[in-house]
Image (tube, rainbow, N blue to C red):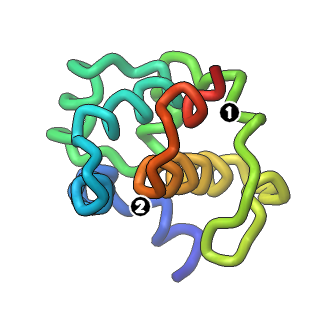
Amino acid sequence: MSRHRVYGVSVASVYPLYVAKAERKGRTGSEVDEIICWLTGHDRENLRAELEAGASFEAFFSRAPRMNPSRSMIKGVVCGIRVEDIEEPTMREIRYLDKLIDELAKGKAMDKILRR
């Protein structure tokens, strides 16, 4: 998939997949929301508005009130690529989110996921 096509994908089209992945492992949609809000600075109301508007990942991250500075602590592999080695900013943010959802689905405690 080309870079442009990935960025044009709406967050709303992927969000249910994040929730389903979490719920299959006994976690909740509320925890998914908490992770997204922690990462982006969006509050839950704003997150819902972005989902309803069909915001692309590129737009969603560019409108984020405050990307969490602790996100640089997110390390590891997603889709065979180390997230800390991704140079392109939007793709790195997407993979940070993917990694956090993976950690949630693997049963990690929220304090550890949110780098507290």
Tell me the distance, in whole angstroms, between the alpha carbons under discs 2 and 1: 23 Å
Specify the label residue 19 is tagged with. none
According to the picture, the residue beneath numbered tag 1 turns out to be: 71
Residue 25, picture quadrant: bottom left
**Left or right: where does residue 2 sit relative to residue 64?**
right
Q: Is residue 54 above or below residue 47?
A: below
Is there a contact, CB below 8 Å, between mark 2 and mark 1?
Answer: no
- Three-letter code, disc 1: Arg
Of 44 and 105, nearer the camera is: 105
User: How many neighbours does mark 1 have within 10 angstroms: few (below 14), some (14-19), or many (20 or more)?
Assistant: some
Q: Extreme left residue here? A: 52
Q: Position of residue 79 (x, y in %)?
A: 61, 75
Of 43 and 58, nearer the camera is: 43
Q: Is residue 81 above or below residue 39?
A: below
Residue at 23% across, 47% down: 54
User: How many neighbours does mark 2 have within 10 angstroms: few (below 14), some (14-19), or many (20 or more)?
Assistant: few
Q: Position of residue 98 (x, y in %)?
A: 51, 56
According to the picture, the residue beneath numbered tag 2 turns out to be: 8
Q: Is residue 35 above or below residue 20?
A: above
Residue at 33% across, 40% down: 32
Residue 15 visible in this rendered orientation of the protein: no
Q: Is residue 24 above or below residue 23?
A: below
